[in-house]
Image (cartoon, rainbow, N blue to C red):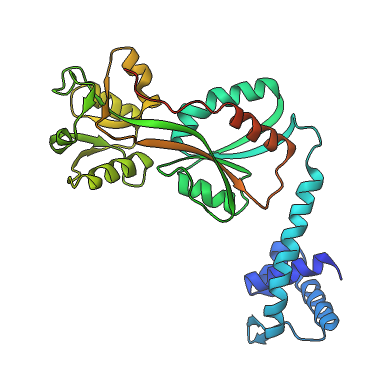
Amino acid sequence: MDLFKLKTFYTVAQLKSFSRAAETLFLSQPAISAQIKDLEYGYGEPLFNRIGRRIELTPAGEVLLHYVENILKIYDESKYAVNCLKEFNQGRITLGTSTFPGTHYLPPLLAEYLRENPQVKLAISVKNAKMIKEMVIKKELELGVIGSIDTLSHEADLEENVLLQDKIVLAVNHGHPLAGKRVVEVSDLKDLTIISAFKNTVSRQVIRLLYYKHGIDLKVSYEIENKGMIKNMVQSGLGCAFFACSEVQKEAEAGWLKILDIENEDLYRNIILIYRKDRELSPASEALVQFLQTKTPEPSGSGV
């Protein structure tokens, strides 16, 4: 049985149209019909019901579709495996990252990796963590590096490795009433003017959990997407903001901001490497996984 005929069957089933399948596969409609007839002859059952201009799968067609989906998936995976270059320092890696690790964590590490492996090509997608996770699960990406408030999500399909735990701190300007402290007491949280990223971000989730834990209403005065603008607003005295320590370490060392720990709280933004358990990584991707795992630093704290 011809794999191409199975692909034709799959395309017709998905599009529910012989003519649209013909356009998609760059074949004539009679050629599409002939391939479907050959399949029906081979299985001894009709695969489609033709109702006027509409078509729908027969019970036999429904059963076959399930197997064809798996056959085509395995075929694609086999092509990928065969085309993988044997040398670990060559090839192409599809990597997804959420904004925080893509901005603050990965660039210097990827630069070091590429210096050691100059033939590797990186295709990087930057999206929110949820989208990156979904793309890895769907095998649209080989690897993902995402921020998370949890150390592991325990997704059944995913291998997950914590690369970094980055402590959450409060940033204020040097004229703020709390600037003389090193540690913010829980009672101080009630009256703060909070500048925050949007609700679907990891930073905002951490803040919400912190306030909920202590029974405090979270009142966000400014919602801003851009972290650079949030830092500038804090520096200008318009409020304070929670950051992962590595995001504001340079500003604190330069004296532009003061960063404070939260009393009796160990709040972290985790950076997690993810890939599918059932997917054979390319040699280049496997090498990058090992590289990132060896470069995992100790959890960061304020230290300022």
Q: Residue furthest front?
A: 264
Quadrant in which the C terminus is drawn: top left
Q: Quadrant of residue 230?
A: top left
Q: Which residue is rendered at x = 66% and y = 69% of the image?
A: 20
Image height check: is 259 above or below 95? above
| Position of residue 168 in the picture relative to residue 60 (left or right) | left
Image height check: is 231 above or below 8? above
Quadrant in which the N terminus is drawn: bottom right
Q: Quadrant of residue 30?
A: bottom right
Q: Which residue is rendered at x = 82% and y = 86% of the image?
A: 44
Image location (x, y in percent) of residue 283: 74, 37
Image location (x, y in percent) of residue 175: 16, 18
Q: Which residue is rendered at x = 53% and y = 54% of the image?
A: 155
Image location (x, y in percent) of residue 288: 65, 32
Image height check: is 97 above or below 280? above
Q: Choose between 180 and 252: the one closer to the eye.
A: 180
Q: Choose between 101 and 260: the one closer to the eye.
A: 260
Q: Which residue is rendered at x = 46% and y = 29% of the image?
A: 103
Q: Choose between 259 and 19: the one closer to the eye.
A: 259
| Position of residue 125 in the picture relative to residue 269 (left or right) | right
- Total marks shown come to 0
Image location (x, y in percent) of residue 85: 79, 37
Image height check: is 143 above or below 232? below
Q: Choose between 71 and 158: the one closer to the eye.
A: 158
